[in-house]
Image (tube, grey):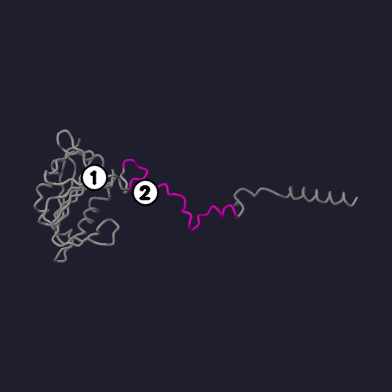
């Protein structure tokens, strides 16, 4: 009888425990060890942001990314002109086409000049939405130049509203001391006296193109007409 009483007591305890176990009411957190394990730790990155990188084209096939690509140059068309996005253009024969390795650069040209008096034209493309307003870009470019009399470069620059290739465009020119990061995000600056900027922002059905020619003033001045002629050669394909 004693053994039977013990078995009955054990069975009763088991049934009582099962009957008392209930599911947590809706809205209650799961056991602490479960939800705490789901919180990102210092070494576990948070869930990815679906919008991260979209401004530079991540996930959008129509906007270039900042990731490097293999070297590429503009394709030559059957008529000898160069293809650049929706445009074709005629480049000066003595300008050297340099390969580009960034999707944000549409083209790169080295201008002829004496050693120490170099100048370079970089054509940027940031997708259909561009890289800010026209004034934003003018302010960035002109902010890289300092005037000997302390005036703001924006106050002495020549800014012209015009058209190239039948598209609305803004043309700007300025000279002075050029001070700018050696490359985006760099802490080391380029600091050169007697430099010039000739630049244009040209709209297109695919978004604006940014033509930025910077270099030694004598070289830039000597190629000003060639640069303007190149812009005038733009045609939609």
Disc 2 crowd rating (10 Å Cα; few below 14, some 14-19, many 20+) is: few
Of residues 152 and 209, the one nearer the viewer is 209
- Secondary structure beneath disc 1? strand
- Nearer to us of marks 1 and 2 is 1
Q: Quadrant of residue 141?
A: bottom left
Label at residue 39: none
Q: Is residue 10 left or right of residue 29?
A: right
Instruction: State the image coordinates of residue 232 (x, y, percent, origin top left).
Output: 13, 42
Q: Is residue 59 above or below residue 179?
A: above
Report the magenta residues as a range.
33-62
Q: Is residue 206 left or right of residue 177?
A: right
Quadrant position of the C terminus in the picture: top left
Residue under label 2, please give it: 53
- Secondary structure beneath disc 2? loop
Q: What is the magenta segment's predominant secondary structure?
A: loop
Of residues 4 and 162, the one nearer the viewer is 4
Question: Residue at image x 47%, y 53%?
Answer: 46
Q: Is residue 107 above or below residue 148?
A: above
Q: Quadrant of residue 139?
A: bottom left
Q: Residue furthest bottom?
A: 149
Question: Residue at image x 23%, y 59%?
Answer: 180
Say whether marks 1 and 2 touch (CB < 8 Å).
no
Q: Residue furthest right?
A: 1
Disc 1 crowd rating (10 Å Cα; few below 14, some 14-19, many 20+) is: many
Instruction: State the image coordinates of residue 2 (x, y, percent, origin top left).
Output: 89, 52
Total labels: the figure holds 2
Q: Is residue 88 left or right of residue 222?
A: right
Residue under label 1, please give it: 106
Q: Is residue 79 left or right of residue 40?
A: left
Residues at marks 1 and 2, CA–CA distance in whole angstroms: 20 Å
Instruction: State the image coordinates of residue 37 (x, y, percent, origin top left).
Output: 56, 54
């Amino acid at each position: 009888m004693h053994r039977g009483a013990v078995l009955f007591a054990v069975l009763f305890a088991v049934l009582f425990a099962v009957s008392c176990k209930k599911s947590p009411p809706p809205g209650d957190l799961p056991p602490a060890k479960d939800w705490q394990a789901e919180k990102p730790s210092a070494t576990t990155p948070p869930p990815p942001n679906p919008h991260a990188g979209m401004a530079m084209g991540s996930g959008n096939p129509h906007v270039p990314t900042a990731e490097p690509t293999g070297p590429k140059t503009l394709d030559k068309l059957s008529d000898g002109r160069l293809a650049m996005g929706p445009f074709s253009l005629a480049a000066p024969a003595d300008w050297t086409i340099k390969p580009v390795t960034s999707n944000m650069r549409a083209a790169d040209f080295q201008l002829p000049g004496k050693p120490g008096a170099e100048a370079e034209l970089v054509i940027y493309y940031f997708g259909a939405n561009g890289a800010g307003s026209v004034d934003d870009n003018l302010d960035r470019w002109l902010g890289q130049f300092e005037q000997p009399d302390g005036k703001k470069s924006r106050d002495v620059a020549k800014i012209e509203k015009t058209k190239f290739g039948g598209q609305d465009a803004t043309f700007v020119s300025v000279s002075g001391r050029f001070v700018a990061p050696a490359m985006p995000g760099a802490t080391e600056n380029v600091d050169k006296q007697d430099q010039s900027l000739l630049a244009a922002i040209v709209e297109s059905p695919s978004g604006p193109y940014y033509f930025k020619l910077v270099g030694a003033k004598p070289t830039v001045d000597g190629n000003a007409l060639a640069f303007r002629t190149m812009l005038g050669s733009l045609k939609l394909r």
